[in-house]
């Protein structure tokens, strides 16, 4: 499954999810008359595996999110909010969202759990730190955060639980891209207790083999396109894979930069 080169990034033509739901799923699952051998059955079996694997995943398309006004010139797009009726899974965020500030806008976030900030577009000032594209800031629990932008910015904000995180600043221009695997570089933004906040940079054609998740794994597309099994993620899309799940195939045709929060050491199968 690949997108056509002339398809606009935000076109619904790239969203294959309708083909995985009824009535199409039942039609695909049935053996296809005229196909040699068990080809029709094998296609149905793969579709069934894909549907079962995706049942526990939460995938959010940026183009389908609603912009919620927060203040003059400020809006928010929710990516994830944990249910309040149960304890969080290992590595599960309390919430994740994109805050969009127009030029000259500002917002004060109240005290909460440890918060991660990653600039996705433009530049901003967060808690007195001037941040540019792909700059990362972690504020410890209990800290309020003032966000301002002179020229406009989109900022990913992730809130967790706990009180062990220390203030951490990682600037994109200073951090470098250490080698991680063939065609893949990885930047550790923060780590603790076996989990980490990470930036991955992969060349076109790069892939990661089958792996399982000891902690919830979040993937936010900063640039490019990525297949997580049979799901195509594009710029601004987000997926949360719960602890105990796994990905059989992770690969990119275009090259990609993505933010991930999950296991520091991937659990390869």
Image (tube, grey):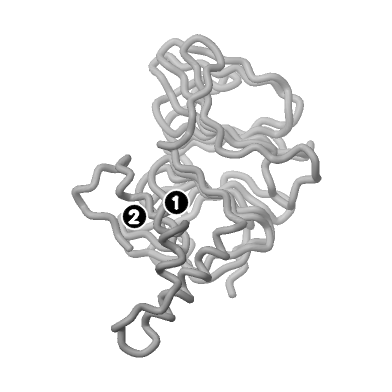
Judged left or right of residue 171, residue 141 is right
The CA span between labels 2 and 1 is 15 Å
Binning the other alpha carbons within 10 Å of mark 2 as few (below 14), some (14 to 19) or many (20 upward) gives some
Disc 1 secondary structure class: loop
Per the rendering, the mark at residue 255 is 2
Is there any visible trace of residue 168 in the rendered image?
no
| Quadrant of the rendered image containing residue 143 | top right
Residue 106 position within the rendered picture, expressed as x and y whole percent measured from the top left: 52, 13
Residue 154 position within the rendered picture, expressed as x and y whole percent measured from the top left: 45, 28
| Residue carrying label 1 | 177
Q: How many marks?
A: 2
* 58 or 252: nearer the viewer: 58
Is there any visible trace of residue 247 in the rendered image?
yes
State the residue lying farthest toward the bottom: 37
Picture layout, residue 38 above or below residue 96:
below
Q: Measuring 41% from the left and 63% from the top, which residue is drawn there? A: 251
Quarter of the rendering occupied by the N terminus = bottom left
Picture layout, residue 125 above or below residue 133:
above
N-term-proximal mark, 2 vs 1 = 1
| Quadrant of the rendered image containing residue 254 | bottom left
Judged left or right of residue 151, residue 229 is right
Q: Are marks 2 and 1 in contact (CB under 8 Å)?
A: no
Judged left or right of residue 143, residue 267 is left
Binning the other alpha carbons within 10 Å of mark 1 as few (below 14), some (14 to 19) or many (20 upward) gives some
Disc 2 secondary structure class: loop
Residue 144 position within the rendered picture, expressed as x and y whole percent measured from the top left: 69, 20
Q: Measuring 21% from the left and 52% from the top, which residue is drawn there? A: 5
């Amino acid at each position: 499954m690949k997108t056509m080169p002339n398809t606009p990034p935000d076109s619904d033509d790239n969203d294959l999810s309708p083909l995985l739901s009824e009535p199409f799923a039942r039609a695909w699952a049935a053996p296809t008359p005229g196909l040699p051998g068990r080809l029709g059955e094998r296609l149905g079996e793969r579709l069934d595996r894909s549907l079962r694997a995706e049942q526990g995943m939460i995938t959010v398309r940026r183009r389908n999110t609603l912009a919620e006004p927060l203040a003059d010139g400020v809006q928010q797009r929710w990516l994830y909010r944990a249910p309040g009726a149960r304890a969080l899974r290992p590595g599960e965020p309390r919430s994740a969202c994109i805050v969009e500030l127009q030029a000259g806008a500002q917002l004060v976030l109240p005290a909460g759990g440890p918060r991660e900030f990653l600039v996705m577009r433009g530049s901003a000032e967060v808690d007195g730190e001037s941040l540019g594209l792909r700059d990362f800031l972690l504020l410890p629990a209990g800290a309020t955060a003032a966000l301002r932008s002179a020229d406009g910015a989109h900022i990913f904000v992730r809130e967790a639980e706990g009180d062990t995180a220390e203030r951490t600043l990682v600037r994109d221009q200073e951090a470098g891209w250490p080698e991680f695997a063939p065609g893949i570089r990885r930047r550790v933004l923060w780590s603790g207790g076996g989990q980490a906040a990470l930036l991955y940079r992969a060349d076109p054609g790069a892939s990661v083999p089958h792996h399982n998740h000891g902690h919830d794994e979040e993937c936010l597309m900063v640039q490019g396109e990525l297949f997580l099994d049979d799901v195509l993620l594009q710029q601004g899309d987000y997926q949360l894979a719960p602890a105990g799940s796994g990905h059989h195939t992770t690969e990119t045709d275009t090259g990609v930069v993505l933010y991930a929060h999950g296991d520091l050491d991937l659990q390869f199968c």
